[in-house]
């Protein structure tokens, strides 16, 4: 399988290899928000659920932001990435203009005030996590392709073709991969 020369850092994307057997990650794009000695954490960007945030959190206010299945870990937890920066205390900057988490009561207040727009935030149920060294082992097995930071792929209208679109954006050798069938036996 083809690999990229990018290293895993916060803000980059993990693109699953075309024939990944793990159903949790088949044809997924994971936004890494943390990577270091303690391990790695990210959110699947292309597994949109059929609910809006108002159906998950009652009385949140006038927002209909989508909710995604962030990964198989702690699926009883809610996470979010946003463009609100220091308007929410405790937000962690992933890269310039992109933030993760922060004080939920402050977020709720900003939503109630109409300051937060649907395209300012993405919500995730659960997350994708790797223990120290685990992601590196998966990268050595070529389970993932790392794509560079690009905010255009996060807050977009649809995430359905995200896996393919990011691969195509990376050049010719990755564009070929983007056209692989999910099941090569059916080709």
Image (tube, grey):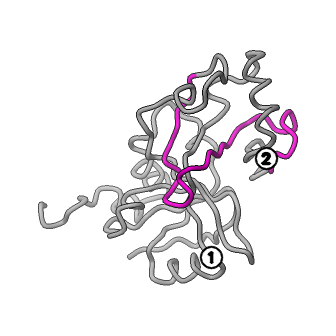
Tell me what residue is drawn at x 48 percent, y 70 percent.
144
Tell me what residue is drawn at x 56 percent, y 30 percent.
53
- Looking at the image, residue 165 sits to the left or right of residue 21; the answer is right
Crowdedness near tag 2: few (<14), some (14–19) or many (≥20) residues, C-alpha within 10 Å: few
Return the residue at label 1: 131
Q: Point out the image quarter for the C terminus.
A: bottom left
Tell me what residue is drawn at x 27 percent, y 60 percent.
180
Q: Where is residue 9 in the image (x, y as percent from the top left)?
A: 69, 65
Question: Is 36 within the magenta?
Answer: no
The magenta stretch is 64-92
- Looking at the image, residue 33 sits to the left or right of residue 64; the answer is right
Give SS at disc 1.
Answer: loop
For this orientation, the residue located farthest to the left is 186
Instruction: Determine whether label 2 and label 1 are within 8 Å by CB.
Output: no
Give the image quarter of residue 64. top right
- Looking at the image, residue 4 sits to the left or right of residue 35; the answer is left
Q: Where is residue 37 in the image (x, y as percent from the top left)?
A: 74, 78
Residue 96, labelled with which disc? 2
In the depicted view, which residue is nearer to us: 136 or 96?
136
Position of residue 186 relative to residue 113, above or below, is: below
Q: Where is residue 142 in the image (x, y as percent from the top left)?
A: 45, 78
Crowdedness near tag 1: few (<14), some (14–19) or many (≥20) residues, C-alpha within 10 Å: few
Give the image quarter of residue 179. bottom left
Q: Position of residue 54 (x, y in %)?
A: 57, 25
Tell me what residue is drawn at x 60 percent, y 39 percent.
123
Question: Is 89 within the magenta?
Answer: yes
Q: Point out the image quarter for the N terminus.
A: bottom left
Residue 150, labelled with which disc? none
| Between discs 2 and 1, the one toward the N terminus | 2
Give the CA separation, mark 2 to mark 1.
26 Å
Mark closer to the observer (2, 1): 1
């Amino acid at each position: 399988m083809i690999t990229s020369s990018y290293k895993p850092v916060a803000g980059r994307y993990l693109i699953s290899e075309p024939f990944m057997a793990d159903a949790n990650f088949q044809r997924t794009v994971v936004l890494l928000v943390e990577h270091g000695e303690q391990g790695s954490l990210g959110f699947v960007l292309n597994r949109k659920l059929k609910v809006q945030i108002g159906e998950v959190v009652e009385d949140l206010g006038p927002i209909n932001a989508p909710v995604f299945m962030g990964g198989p870990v702690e699926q009883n937890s809610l996470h979010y990435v946003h463009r609100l920066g220091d308007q929410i205390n405790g937000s962690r900057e992933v890269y310039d203009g992109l933030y993760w988490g922060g004080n939920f009561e402050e977020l709720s207040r900003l939503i109630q005030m109409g300051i937060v727009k649907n395209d300012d935030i993405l919500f995730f149920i659960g997350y994708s996590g790797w223990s120290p060294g685990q992601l590196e082992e998966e990268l050595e097995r070529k389970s993932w392709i790392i794509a560079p930071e690009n905010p255009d792929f996060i807050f977009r209208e649809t995430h359905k073709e995200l896996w393919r679109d990011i691969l195509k954006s990376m050049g010719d050798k990755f564009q070929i991969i983007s056209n692989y069938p999910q099941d090569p036996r059916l080709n």
